[in-house]
Image: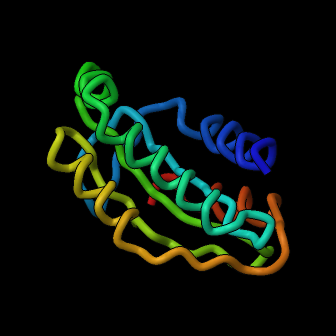
Amino acid sequence: RLLAAAAVLIAVFAFTAAPAAHAEMKAEVDLELVLAVDASLSVDAEEAQLQRQGYIAALTDPRTIKAIQAGVNGRIAVFYFEWASEFYQRVIVDWTVVEDEASARAVADMIAATPYRGERRTSISGAIQYATGLFGR
């Protein structure tokens, strides 16, 4: 499971190297960050909670916020979804600009407020295919 999640994040990071402009947000960002989280039934509720707590802690850590603000534009765009089967991608946080503690906390709160829902099957290729279509939106 951890290997699968790491593979998705590695694949997603490969698409985020260049700065991007979001027409809808009209904000130049230093990074488009897609957080793709395994929600297949191979992840139990306790593990799912642990994953979410890790993302929440990372997003709201002062060192993360400082790193975001150190970029050329001082902001990133974050998209968080949970995936299982080829056709199951559940958006928890649509593209949101993170540029300070308040915006990082808003993303973390959206993740924390959404009840976990595990689904059958696991398709990392489905998650990667879904994620690649998100960039530049």
Relative to residue 26, is residue 125 drawn left or right?
Answer: right
Residue drawn at x 49%, y 31% is: 18
Relative depth, front residue between 97 and 45 = 45
Relative to residue 101, is residue 87 drawn left or right?
Answer: right
Q: Is residue 73 visible?
A: no
Percent of width and height locating residue 39: 67, 67
Quadrant for residue 41, please give it.
Answer: bottom right
Single out the residue that lies furthest toward the front. 46
Relative depth, front residue between 115 and 133 = 115
Give the answer, above or below, for where 63 lies relative to 58. Answer: above
Q: Is residue 10 visible?
A: yes
Work out which quarter of the rendered image holds the C terminus and state it.
bottom left
Percent of width and height locating residue 32: 45, 44
Percent of width and height locating residue 88: 69, 78
Quadrant for residue 127, please give it.
Answer: bottom right
Residue drawn at x 37%, y 64% is: 112
* Way the structure is coloured: rainbow
Residue drawn at x 60%, y 55% is: 36
Give the answer, above or below, for where 137 lies relative to 68. Answer: below
Total labels: the figure holds 0
Residue drawn at x 25%, y 28% is: 62
Give the answer, above or below, for where 74 lies relative to 45. Answer: above
Relative to residue 102, is residue 3 drawn left or right?
Answer: right
